[in-house]
Amino acid sequence: RQPHPLVLLLAALLCPWSATNVSAMLSSVASRAAQAARSMSTLSGSRVLGRAATASADVQSQAYPIIDHKYDAVVVGAGGAGLRAAMGLAEHGFKTACISKLFPTRSHTVAAQGGINAALGNQHDDDWRWHMYDTVKGSDWLGDQDAIQYMCREAPKAVRELESYGMPFSRNEEGKIYQRAFGGQSRDYGSGGQAYRCAAAADRTGHAMLHTLYGRSLAFDTTYFIEYFALDLIMNEEGECVGLLALNMEDGTIHRFNTNHTVLATGGYGRAYFSATSAHTCTG
């Protein structure tokens, strides 16, 4: 297609080139544009054909491949509870897997600031029964009192265990684990005033705990499936959990875990609410 005469006239007036050279140049540009348009048309057609061929192949393909794993125990979650559960299972000889949608040190335990309530008695006389009373009262008597009893009785031992793993607790003047006052904690079943019961590592207790536990967990023979999202539990006809399905978020593959023991250490479910101060990763 030849360029319009007005284009040639303007080119001759504004440019030192001859009108013939300008005409040849514009013709070349037009030719290249037409060729590019034909190429795009061909490419678009091939994409449509490619999609149709893929869809046809999908219809004729076999079931989606599932990768199987067999373990004595599987822990879902790698926060403070999940890491400690996986450590304990591996320590007692179970072939253990730990599944986490995040790298362990990014679990939401890392965000905890205040501390850990335990009747250590480092600031004053204390008793785990006073701690239990405060916990039952704080739950409006709706909490599982057997579980609360166990937690409060074993809390001092758990804190000292963390200290033995290397957790850098803050210290009081005597060199003991520092304990601060915290909400809802009292002495002598509520009649003795404020209790100083909350063992803390400055204002980053969760950060110190999680990194300490993760470092310690590497000493045990546990297989970590990092960035795997648990999709569903597998139940048998008797209603027993015999495993779970998980999605590898890196490549989209489905993994089936066959196990005799499944531990759910999935943390809080802040995402159940429209707005929550916990992270978006708290899917429960």
Image: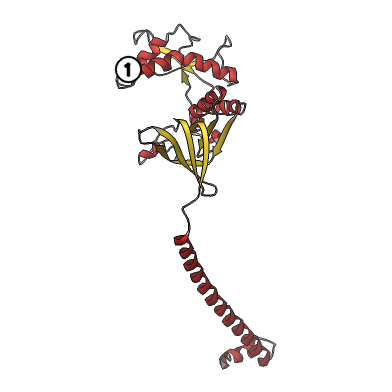
Observer able to see residue 55: yes
Front residue of 271/19: it is: 271
Q: Residue 278 at what x, y percent from top left?
A: 43, 35
Residue under the image location 51 percent in, 20 percent down = 200
20 vs 120, left or right, is right
Q: Is residue 64 above or below residue 191?
A: below
Q: Residue 195 at what x, y percent from top left?
A: 42, 12
Q: Is residue 130 above or below residue 24?
A: above
Q: Quadrant of the N terminus?
A: bottom right
Q: Amino acid at mark 1?
A: Lys
Residue under the image location 46 percent in, 16 percent down = 155
Front residue of 113/162: it is: 162
Observer able to see residue 281: no
Q: Residue 238 at what x, y percent from top left?
A: 35, 33
Q: Are there few (<14), some (14-19), or many (20+) residues within 10 Å of tag 1?
A: some
Q: Which residue is mark 1?
A: 137
**Element on which disc 1 rests:** helix
Report the number of numbered marks: 1
Residue under the image location 54 percent in, 47 percent down = 250
Quadrant in the picture for residue 163: top right
Q: Is residue 199 above or below residue 187?
A: below
Residue under the image location 47 percent in, 24 percent down = 114
Extreme-left residue of the structure: 141
- Coloring basis for residues: secondary structure
Q: Quadrant of the C terminus?
A: top left
Quadrant in the picture for residue 145: top left
Quadrant in the picture for residue 8: bottom right
